[in-house]
Amino acid sequence: MKPVLIIDDDPLIREYLRFMLARGGYDVVTLPHGENAADLCAQVQFHAVVTDLFMPNSDGIETVKAVRRVAPALPIIVVTGKAGDWFDSCARAMRAFGASVLLRKPFKSRQLLDALASFDAASRVSGELPADNDAAAPTKTDSQ
């Protein structure tokens, strides 16, 4: 199984994501914040990281930057429910910090599973991850 690291301060969201990804065939590790994420990513070869953007202690930006330092090619999916009207600007900024995909909560489980599957397909075809993965970004109709 492919291990995925989920980082979210909300225990219900963590459990929902853990359950969803486990049903999708992933081995899931969870953290309540990003403070130890880089250390863990340096020790475990994760398939991807899924992190919330807004968290206490270590937010998603700090988490993405820290993980990028130890695992430059690791796919990182950032999820947020607070992006509102500035979602597109937030997506561009998160990509600049190293995120592979930004999903707006609430998102469909298929969107997350498709994003994870796209990392498999991209690495099989080219040996590297896509630089800009808009295929998994939800449209306004998906989140409204």
Image (spheres, rainbow, N blue to C red):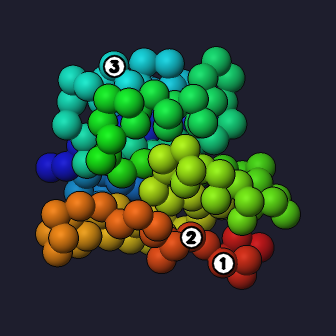
| Viewer-proximal residue among 95 and 49 | 95
How crowded pointer 3 is (Cα within 10 Å; few <14, some 14-19, many 20+) is rated as few
How crowded pointer 2 is (Cα within 10 Å; few <14, some 14-19, many 20+) is rated as some
Q: Position of residue 101 (x, y in %)?
A: 50, 59
Q: Are dots 1 and 2 in contact, CB under 8 Å? A: yes
* Residue at (58, 41) in percent of width and height: 52
* Residue at (50, 33) in percent of width and height: 65
How many marks the image carries: the answer is 3
Is residue 118 visible in the rendered image? The answer is yes
Judge from the rendering whether residue 123 lies leftward or rightward of residue 56; answer left or right: left
As shown in the figure, which amino acid type bears the numbered disc 2?
Ala
Reading the chain from its start, which is encountered first: label 1 or label 3? 3
- Label 3 belongs to which residue? 39
As shown in the figure, which amino acid type bears the numbered disc 1?
Thr
Q: CA distance from mark 3 to mark 2?
A: 28 Å
* Residue at (42, 18) in percent of width and height: 36
- Label 1 belongs to which residue? 139
**Which residue is at the far right?**
85
Where is residue 40, by image quadrant?
top left
Q: Compared to 139, does 60 lie above or below?
A: above
| SS of the residue under disc 3 | helix
Judge from the rendering whether residue 90 lies leftward or rightward of residue 9; answer left or right: right
Reading the chain from its start, which is encountered first: label 3 or label 2? 3
Q: Which mark is residue 50?
A: none
Is residue 113 visible in the rendered image? The answer is no
